[in-house]
Image (cartoon, rainbow, N blue to C red):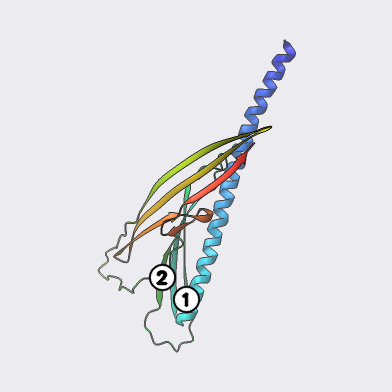
Amino acid sequence: MFDLGKRAQAATELAVLGSIILIIFSFLINYSEKLNRQQSYIQQTFRTALREARNANHNASYTRVAFRRMPNVYTPMDLGQVQSFSSSANVLWADGLNEDEHGVSKYQLNEDVAIDIPYRETPDDGTIEIGQNQFINQVDSQVTFIKQETPGSIVTNKSLTAQDYLDATVDISGTTYSFTHSLGDRGKYYPGDNVLMRARNMQ
């Protein structure tokens, strides 16, 4: 009885320790993934701003905001959390021959085409313009199990079908822009109607 009690205690401690280790690894994976994506967006935004400035032979301001579904470490067949990433860059590339007074300014949301932001004079009366941005997610997710029995084996197919719409209203320099994007490949949001599907077999 004494040995059995020790074994039970050891098994309990191992289960608790294993759960703690899984939680720590899950946090590290999510954090490193988020940090990696943020750095990637910063570099992409700078390169895009550099290209726009070179094409315009002037100053270019580029802002990008992206929403992505993070991987779900605990239940890979379910949707993960939504994370937002924002980055901006301002680049001057000019030879002095362009006589235009103002450069270009663009804004990109998710994987949509960037929109041109018209130049607007800054008010000189000391007032501060406040833009209100709104992002709303509408999710319809369904997990299906299909059990197939054959002589000698049982295979269960688990599939995920998810539709996740992101409705955005963005105020930029006093002008309101509306977007409707949906979740697609690699956890990104694209214009139009997209459906995310996953499937796996379990024996």
- Residue farthest toward the right in the current orientation of the protein: 3
Q: Which mark is residue 106?
A: 2
Q: Measure the alpha-carbon separation of dots 1 and 2.
A: 9 Å
Q: Residue furthest front?
A: 151
Q: Marks 1 and 2: CB-CB under 8 Å?
A: yes
The part of the image, by quadrant, that contains residue 72 is top right
Q: Say which mark, if any, is on residue 40.
A: none
Question: Between residues 48 and 142, which one lies in front from this camera angle?
Answer: 142
Image quadrant holding the N terminus, namely top right
Amino acid at the residue labelled 2: Lys
Q: Mark 1 falls on what kind of element?
A: helix
User: Which residue in the rendered view is the most extreme toward the top?
Assistant: 1
Q: Position of residue 67 (x, y in %)?
A: 46, 55
Q: Is residue 52 above or below residue 178?
A: below
From the image, tell me which residue sits under label 1: 52
- Dot 1 amino acid type: Glu
User: Residue 79: image x %, image y %?
Assistant: 50, 45
- Local crowd at mark 1 within 10 Å, few (<14), some, or many (≥20)? many
